[in-house]
Image (cartoon, rainbow, N blue to C red):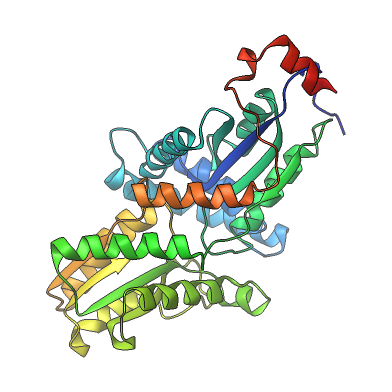
Protein backbone atom coordinates (compact mmCIF):
# COMPACT_ATOMS: atom_id res chain seq x y z
CA UNK A 1 0.00 0.00 0.00
CA UNK A 2 1.28 3.44 -0.90
CA UNK A 3 0.95 5.88 1.97
CA UNK A 4 0.25 9.57 1.60
CA UNK A 5 3.24 11.82 2.12
CA UNK A 6 3.28 13.74 5.37
CA UNK A 7 6.05 16.08 4.21
CA UNK A 8 3.63 19.00 4.38
CA UNK A 9 3.19 18.38 8.12
CA UNK A 10 5.49 20.70 10.09
CA UNK A 11 6.59 18.77 13.16
CA UNK A 12 5.80 21.82 15.26
CA UNK A 13 2.24 22.17 13.97
CA UNK A 14 -0.26 22.44 16.79
CA UNK A 15 -2.73 19.55 16.81
CA UNK A 16 -6.29 20.57 16.08
CA UNK A 17 -9.68 18.89 16.42
CA UNK A 18 -11.68 18.27 13.26
CA UNK A 19 -15.33 17.44 12.62
CA UNK A 20 -16.38 15.60 9.47
CA UNK A 21 -20.09 15.99 8.72
CA UNK A 22 -21.24 13.26 6.33
CA UNK A 23 -24.48 12.81 4.42
CA UNK A 24 -25.61 10.58 1.57
CA UNK A 25 -24.83 12.65 -1.51
CA UNK A 26 -26.33 13.95 -4.71
CA UNK A 27 -25.71 14.12 -8.46
CA UNK A 28 -23.78 17.13 -9.75
CA UNK A 29 -26.68 18.12 -12.02
CA UNK A 30 -30.24 16.98 -12.78
CA UNK A 31 -29.31 15.32 -16.06
CA UNK A 32 -29.06 11.70 -17.17
CA UNK A 33 -25.26 11.54 -17.28
CA UNK A 34 -24.76 13.01 -13.80
CA UNK A 35 -27.53 10.93 -12.27
CA UNK A 36 -26.20 7.75 -13.88
CA UNK A 37 -22.72 8.41 -12.47
CA UNK A 38 -24.16 9.03 -9.02
CA UNK A 39 -26.43 5.98 -9.06
CA UNK A 40 -23.59 3.75 -10.22
CA UNK A 41 -21.48 4.73 -7.23
CA UNK A 42 -24.41 4.54 -4.81
CA UNK A 43 -25.94 1.26 -5.94
CA UNK A 44 -22.60 -0.52 -6.33
CA UNK A 45 -21.88 -0.10 -2.61
CA UNK A 46 -22.11 -3.63 -1.11
CA UNK A 47 -23.55 -2.07 2.05
CA UNK A 48 -26.51 -0.82 0.04
CA UNK A 49 -27.20 -3.89 -2.09
CA UNK A 50 -26.20 -7.19 -0.52
CA UNK A 51 -26.25 -9.39 -3.59
CA UNK A 52 -23.56 -11.48 -5.24
CA UNK A 53 -21.32 -8.98 -7.03
CA UNK A 54 -21.36 -10.74 -10.44
CA UNK A 55 -25.16 -11.08 -10.39
CA UNK A 56 -25.68 -7.53 -9.19
CA UNK A 57 -23.20 -6.17 -11.78
CA UNK A 58 -25.35 -7.66 -14.53
CA UNK A 59 -28.59 -6.27 -13.07
CA UNK A 60 -27.13 -2.86 -12.32
CA UNK A 61 -25.31 -2.30 -15.60
CA UNK A 62 -27.65 -4.24 -17.84
CA UNK A 63 -30.99 -2.94 -16.57
CA UNK A 64 -31.02 -0.29 -13.84
CA UNK A 65 -28.40 2.11 -15.21
CA UNK A 66 -30.06 1.97 -18.62
CA UNK A 67 -33.56 2.82 -17.37
CA UNK A 68 -33.53 4.57 -14.02
CA UNK A 69 -31.22 7.59 -14.64
CA UNK A 70 -33.64 9.33 -17.03
CA UNK A 71 -36.57 9.00 -14.62
CA UNK A 72 -34.48 10.06 -11.67
CA UNK A 73 -33.07 13.04 -13.58
CA UNK A 74 -36.62 14.26 -14.21
CA UNK A 75 -37.39 13.91 -10.50
CA UNK A 76 -34.22 15.79 -9.52
CA UNK A 77 -35.06 18.58 -11.98
CA UNK A 78 -38.41 19.10 -10.24
CA UNK A 79 -36.70 19.98 -6.93
CA UNK A 80 -33.42 21.52 -8.14
CA UNK A 81 -32.92 25.01 -6.70
CA UNK A 82 -30.85 28.06 -7.62
CA UNK A 83 -28.02 26.81 -5.38
CA UNK A 84 -28.17 23.37 -7.01
CA UNK A 85 -29.15 20.17 -5.24
CA UNK A 86 -31.36 20.88 -2.20
CA UNK A 87 -29.48 18.31 -0.14
CA UNK A 88 -26.11 19.84 -0.94
CA UNK A 89 -27.31 23.43 -0.48
CA UNK A 90 -28.87 22.63 2.90
CA UNK A 91 -25.86 20.58 3.99
CA UNK A 92 -23.58 23.49 3.11
CA UNK A 93 -25.75 25.79 5.22
CA UNK A 94 -25.55 23.32 8.12
CA UNK A 95 -21.77 23.22 7.67
CA UNK A 96 -21.45 27.01 7.74
CA UNK A 97 -23.64 27.44 10.81
CA UNK A 98 -21.94 24.65 12.73
CA UNK A 99 -18.51 26.06 11.90
CA UNK A 100 -19.67 29.40 13.33
CA UNK A 101 -21.03 28.00 16.59
CA UNK A 102 -18.11 25.59 17.16
CA UNK A 103 -15.62 28.44 17.05
CA UNK A 104 -12.20 28.91 15.42
CA UNK A 105 -10.41 26.15 17.36
CA UNK A 106 -12.58 23.41 15.77
CA UNK A 107 -12.27 22.73 12.05
CA UNK A 108 -15.53 21.54 10.44
CA UNK A 109 -15.66 19.93 6.99
CA UNK A 110 -18.57 18.59 4.93
CA UNK A 111 -18.49 15.38 2.91
CA UNK A 112 -20.88 13.17 0.98
CA UNK A 113 -20.69 9.39 0.90
CA UNK A 114 -21.47 9.41 -2.83
CA UNK A 115 -20.69 12.24 -5.21
CA UNK A 116 -19.03 15.49 -4.16
CA UNK A 117 -17.58 16.77 -1.89
CA UNK A 118 -16.16 13.31 -1.29
CA UNK A 119 -15.21 11.90 2.08
CA UNK A 120 -11.60 11.68 0.92
CA UNK A 121 -11.48 15.41 0.17
CA UNK A 122 -13.08 16.30 3.50
CA UNK A 123 -10.59 14.20 5.42
CA UNK A 124 -7.70 15.64 3.41
CA UNK A 125 -8.83 19.17 4.28
CA UNK A 126 -8.82 18.23 7.96
CA UNK A 127 -5.39 16.61 7.64
CA UNK A 128 -3.91 19.70 6.04
CA UNK A 129 -5.46 21.86 8.75
CA UNK A 130 -3.53 19.86 11.34
CA UNK A 131 -6.44 17.81 12.71
CA UNK A 132 -4.89 15.09 14.86
CA UNK A 133 -8.29 14.30 16.42
CA UNK A 134 -11.27 13.73 14.13
CA UNK A 135 -14.90 13.20 15.05
CA UNK A 136 -17.02 11.74 12.22
CA UNK A 137 -20.70 12.66 12.40
CA UNK A 138 -22.89 10.86 9.84
CA UNK A 139 -26.11 12.87 9.64
CA UNK A 140 -28.26 9.75 9.90
CA UNK A 141 -30.23 9.75 13.18
CA UNK A 142 -31.07 6.04 12.96
CA UNK A 143 -28.20 3.60 12.45
CA UNK A 144 -28.16 1.27 9.46
CA UNK A 145 -25.46 -0.75 7.82
CA UNK A 146 -26.57 0.80 4.53
CA UNK A 147 -25.82 4.34 5.68
CA UNK A 148 -23.79 4.83 8.87
CA UNK A 149 -21.63 1.73 8.38
CA UNK A 150 -20.94 2.71 4.78
CA UNK A 151 -19.55 6.05 5.95
CA UNK A 152 -17.40 4.21 8.47
CA UNK A 153 -16.08 1.90 5.73
CA UNK A 154 -15.10 4.83 3.54
CA UNK A 155 -13.53 6.89 6.32
CA UNK A 156 -11.39 4.03 7.59
CA UNK A 157 -10.40 2.94 4.09
CA UNK A 158 -9.16 6.46 3.38
CA UNK A 159 -7.32 6.86 6.69
CA UNK A 160 -5.57 3.54 6.13
CA UNK A 161 -3.63 5.37 3.42
CA UNK A 162 -2.30 7.94 5.91
CA UNK A 163 1.11 7.45 7.45
CA UNK A 164 0.16 9.34 10.61
CA UNK A 165 -3.21 8.04 11.81
CA UNK A 166 -5.30 10.57 13.80
CA UNK A 167 -7.32 9.82 16.89
CA UNK A 168 -10.75 8.92 15.56
CA UNK A 169 -14.24 8.98 17.06
CA UNK A 170 -17.47 8.10 15.35
CA UNK A 171 -21.07 9.08 16.17
CA UNK A 172 -22.98 5.83 15.69
CA UNK A 173 -26.55 7.19 15.93
CA UNK A 174 -28.71 9.67 17.81
CA UNK A 175 -32.21 8.34 17.18
CA UNK A 176 -33.26 8.60 20.82
CA UNK A 177 -31.23 11.61 21.90
CA UNK A 178 -33.38 13.97 23.97
CA UNK A 179 -32.10 17.00 22.08
CA UNK A 180 -32.93 15.47 18.71
CA UNK A 181 -36.43 14.50 19.84
CA UNK A 182 -36.98 18.00 21.23
CA UNK A 183 -35.83 19.61 17.98
CA UNK A 184 -38.30 17.43 16.04
CA UNK A 185 -41.12 18.22 18.47
CA UNK A 186 -40.41 21.95 18.27
CA UNK A 187 -40.54 21.83 14.47
CA UNK A 188 -43.91 20.02 14.50
CA UNK A 189 -45.39 22.36 17.09
CA UNK A 190 -44.20 25.45 15.23
CA UNK A 191 -45.71 24.12 12.00
CA UNK A 192 -49.02 23.32 13.66
CA UNK A 193 -49.24 26.71 15.33
CA UNK A 194 -49.51 28.16 11.82
CA UNK A 195 -51.31 25.34 9.99
CA UNK A 196 -53.45 23.68 12.65
CA UNK A 197 -53.52 20.02 13.68
CA UNK A 198 -54.29 17.14 11.29
CA UNK A 199 -56.36 14.02 11.73
CA UNK A 200 -53.08 12.12 11.80
CA UNK A 201 -49.37 12.82 11.78
CA UNK A 202 -47.53 10.46 9.42
CA UNK A 203 -43.90 9.75 10.33
CA UNK A 204 -42.33 8.46 7.11
CA UNK A 205 -38.86 6.91 7.33
CA UNK A 206 -36.70 5.71 4.46
CA UNK A 207 -37.28 2.05 3.69
CA UNK A 208 -34.90 -0.87 4.06
CA UNK A 209 -35.12 -4.46 2.80
CA UNK A 210 -36.85 -6.60 5.41
CA UNK A 211 -34.05 -9.17 5.13
CA UNK A 212 -31.47 -6.65 6.34
CA UNK A 213 -33.34 -6.15 9.60
CA UNK A 214 -33.85 -9.90 10.01
CA UNK A 215 -30.06 -10.23 9.67
CA UNK A 216 -29.52 -7.88 12.61
CA UNK A 217 -29.68 -4.30 11.31
CA UNK A 218 -31.22 -2.19 14.14
CA UNK A 219 -32.71 0.43 11.82
CA UNK A 220 -36.36 -0.62 12.18
CA UNK A 221 -36.14 -0.55 15.98
CA UNK A 222 -34.43 2.83 15.91
CA UNK A 223 -37.18 4.28 13.71
CA UNK A 224 -39.90 2.93 15.98
CA UNK A 225 -38.20 4.35 19.05
CA UNK A 226 -37.79 7.77 17.44
CA UNK A 227 -41.49 7.76 16.57
CA UNK A 228 -42.56 6.65 20.03
CA UNK A 229 -40.43 9.26 21.80
CA UNK A 230 -41.62 12.02 19.48
CA UNK A 231 -45.26 11.01 19.96
CA UNK A 232 -44.76 11.07 23.73
CA UNK A 233 -43.15 14.52 23.56
CA UNK A 234 -46.06 15.78 21.44
CA UNK A 235 -48.56 14.00 23.74
CA UNK A 236 -50.11 12.09 20.86
CA UNK A 237 -52.43 9.14 21.35
CA UNK A 238 -51.79 6.00 19.30
CA UNK A 239 -54.60 6.97 16.90
CA UNK A 240 -53.03 10.38 16.27
CA UNK A 241 -49.97 9.15 14.35
CA UNK A 242 -48.55 6.24 12.42
CA UNK A 243 -45.13 5.09 11.18
CA UNK A 244 -44.54 4.25 7.52
CA UNK A 245 -41.60 3.51 5.21
CA UNK A 246 -40.88 4.98 1.78
CA UNK A 247 -38.51 4.65 -1.19
CA UNK A 248 -38.36 0.91 -1.81
CA UNK A 249 -36.45 -0.63 -4.73
CA UNK A 250 -36.89 -4.01 -6.37
CA UNK A 251 -39.43 -6.77 -5.85
CA UNK A 252 -38.41 -8.19 -2.46
CA UNK A 253 -40.20 -7.19 0.75
CA UNK A 254 -39.15 -3.96 2.41
CA UNK A 255 -40.13 -2.57 5.80
CA UNK A 256 -43.88 -2.04 6.08
CA UNK A 257 -46.29 -0.37 6.03
CA UNK A 258 -45.32 1.41 2.81
CA UNK A 259 -45.91 5.16 2.83
CA UNK A 260 -47.49 5.40 -0.62
CA UNK A 261 -49.92 2.52 -0.07
CA UNK A 262 -50.87 3.86 3.35
CA UNK A 263 -51.66 7.30 1.95
CA UNK A 264 -53.82 5.81 -0.78
CA UNK A 265 -55.85 3.90 1.83
CA UNK A 266 -56.28 6.55 4.55
CA UNK A 267 -59.14 8.61 3.05
CA UNK A 268 -61.38 5.53 2.88
CA UNK A 269 -60.67 5.05 6.59
CA UNK A 270 -61.93 8.54 7.40
CA UNK A 271 -58.49 10.16 7.69
CA UNK A 272 -58.71 13.12 5.33
CA UNK A 273 -56.36 15.72 6.84
CA UNK A 274 -52.77 14.69 7.39
CA UNK A 275 -49.34 16.14 7.97
CA UNK A 276 -46.23 14.19 7.01
CA UNK A 277 -42.85 14.36 8.73
CA UNK A 278 -39.61 12.56 7.77
CA UNK A 279 -37.67 12.12 11.05
CA UNK A 280 -34.95 10.00 9.46
CA UNK A 281 -33.64 12.79 7.21
CA UNK A 282 -31.47 15.58 8.59
CA UNK A 283 -31.94 17.65 5.42
CA UNK A 284 -34.58 17.86 2.73
CA UNK A 285 -33.65 16.01 -0.43
CA UNK A 286 -35.15 14.21 -3.43
CA UNK A 287 -36.89 11.63 -1.24
CA UNK A 288 -38.62 14.25 0.90
CA UNK A 289 -39.26 17.05 -1.58
CA UNK A 290 -40.25 15.06 -4.66
CA UNK A 291 -41.45 11.72 -3.33
CA UNK A 292 -43.13 12.77 -0.07
CA UNK A 293 -44.09 16.41 -0.64
CA UNK A 294 -45.18 15.99 -4.29
CA UNK A 295 -45.82 12.42 -5.44
CA UNK A 296 -47.35 11.12 -2.22
CA UNK A 297 -49.47 14.25 -1.93
CA UNK A 298 -51.02 13.37 -5.28
CA UNK A 299 -51.69 9.82 -4.09
CA UNK A 300 -53.48 11.03 -0.96
CA UNK A 301 -55.56 13.76 -2.58
CA UNK A 302 -56.36 11.51 -5.53
CA UNK A 303 -57.76 8.93 -3.12
CA UNK A 304 -60.13 11.47 -1.58
CA UNK A 305 -57.98 13.23 0.98
CA UNK A 306 -58.76 16.86 1.72
CA UNK A 307 -55.57 18.32 3.18
CA UNK A 308 -51.99 17.14 2.79
CA UNK A 309 -49.15 19.12 4.37
CA UNK A 310 -45.45 18.29 4.47
CA UNK A 311 -43.43 19.40 7.51
CA UNK A 312 -39.86 20.24 6.38
CA UNK A 313 -36.82 18.48 7.81
CA UNK A 314 -34.81 20.16 10.56
CA UNK A 315 -32.34 21.42 7.92
CA UNK A 316 -30.27 24.37 9.22
CA UNK A 317 -32.87 25.56 11.73
CA UNK A 318 -31.59 27.07 14.96
CA UNK A 319 -32.88 24.15 17.00
CA UNK A 320 -31.15 21.59 14.79
CA UNK A 321 -27.83 23.42 14.83
CA UNK A 322 -28.05 23.82 18.60
CA UNK A 323 -28.68 20.09 19.00
CA UNK A 324 -25.82 19.13 16.65
CA UNK A 325 -23.47 21.45 18.52
CA UNK A 326 -24.42 19.84 21.84
CA UNK A 327 -24.07 16.35 20.36
CA UNK A 328 -20.60 17.19 19.05
CA UNK A 329 -19.53 18.73 22.35
CA UNK A 330 -20.50 15.58 24.24
CA UNK A 331 -18.51 13.39 21.86
CA UNK A 332 -15.47 15.68 22.14
CA UNK A 333 -15.24 15.26 25.91
CA UNK A 334 -11.72 14.38 27.00
CA UNK A 335 -9.99 15.77 23.93
CA UNK A 336 -7.71 18.72 24.55
CA UNK A 337 -8.75 21.90 22.78
CA UNK A 338 -6.44 24.24 20.89
CA UNK A 339 -7.32 27.86 21.58
CA UNK A 340 -6.22 31.01 19.83
CA UNK A 341 -7.67 30.45 16.36
CA UNK A 342 -5.83 29.39 13.23
CA UNK A 343 -2.55 27.54 13.90
CA UNK A 344 -0.82 30.00 11.57
CA UNK A 345 -1.47 32.72 14.13
CA UNK A 346 0.15 30.82 17.02
CA UNK A 347 3.44 32.07 18.34
CA UNK A 348 6.70 30.25 17.72
CA UNK A 349 6.82 29.36 21.41
CA UNK A 350 3.39 27.71 21.24
CA UNK A 351 4.40 25.71 18.18
CA UNK A 352 7.62 24.53 19.84
CA UNK A 353 5.70 23.62 22.97
CA UNK A 354 3.26 21.52 21.01
CA UNK A 355 6.21 19.73 19.39
CA UNK A 356 7.12 18.12 22.71
Q: Residue at x 53, y 27 (%)?
A: 104
The image shows residue 254 at horizontal and vertical percentages of 51, 75
Residue 138 can be seen, yes or no: no
Q: In this picture, is 38 found above or below 270?
A: above
Is 141 in front, or is 65?
Answer: 141
Q: Is residue 56 left or right of residue 29?
A: right
Image quadrant in which you'd find residue 6: top right
Q: Is residue 232 left or right of residue 221?
A: left
The quarter of the image holding the C terminus is top right
Q: In this picture, is 78 found above or below 245?
A: above
The image shows residue 349 at horizontal and vertical percentages of 75, 13
Residue 13 can be seen, yes or no: yes
The image shows residue 25 at horizontal and vertical percentages of 50, 45
Image quadrant in which you'd find residue 187: bottom left
The image shows residue 332 at horizontal and vertical percentages of 64, 46
The quarter of the image holding the N terminus is top right
Q: In this picture, is 110 found above or below 12?
A: below
Is 338 in front, or is 217?
Answer: 338
Q: Is residue 302 left or right of residue 84?
A: left
Q: Residue furthest left?
A: 306
Q: Residue furthest top?
A: 348
Q: Residue at x 26, y 78 (%)?
A: 264
Q: Is residue 258 left or right of residue 57?
A: left
Q: Residue at x 82, y 21 (%)?
A: 355
Q: Residue at x 35, y 47 (%)?
A: 318
Image quadrant in which you'd find residue 307: bottom left
Amino acid sequence: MKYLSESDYPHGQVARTGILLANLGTPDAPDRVSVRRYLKEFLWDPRVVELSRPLWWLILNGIILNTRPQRSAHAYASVWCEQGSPLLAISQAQHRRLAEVMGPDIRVELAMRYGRPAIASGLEALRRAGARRILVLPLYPQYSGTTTASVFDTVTAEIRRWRWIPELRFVNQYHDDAGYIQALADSVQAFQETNGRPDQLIMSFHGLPQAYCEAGDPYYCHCQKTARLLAERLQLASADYRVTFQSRLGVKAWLKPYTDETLKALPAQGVRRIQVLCPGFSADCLETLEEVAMENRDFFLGAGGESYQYIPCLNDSAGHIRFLRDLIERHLQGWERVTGGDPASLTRAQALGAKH
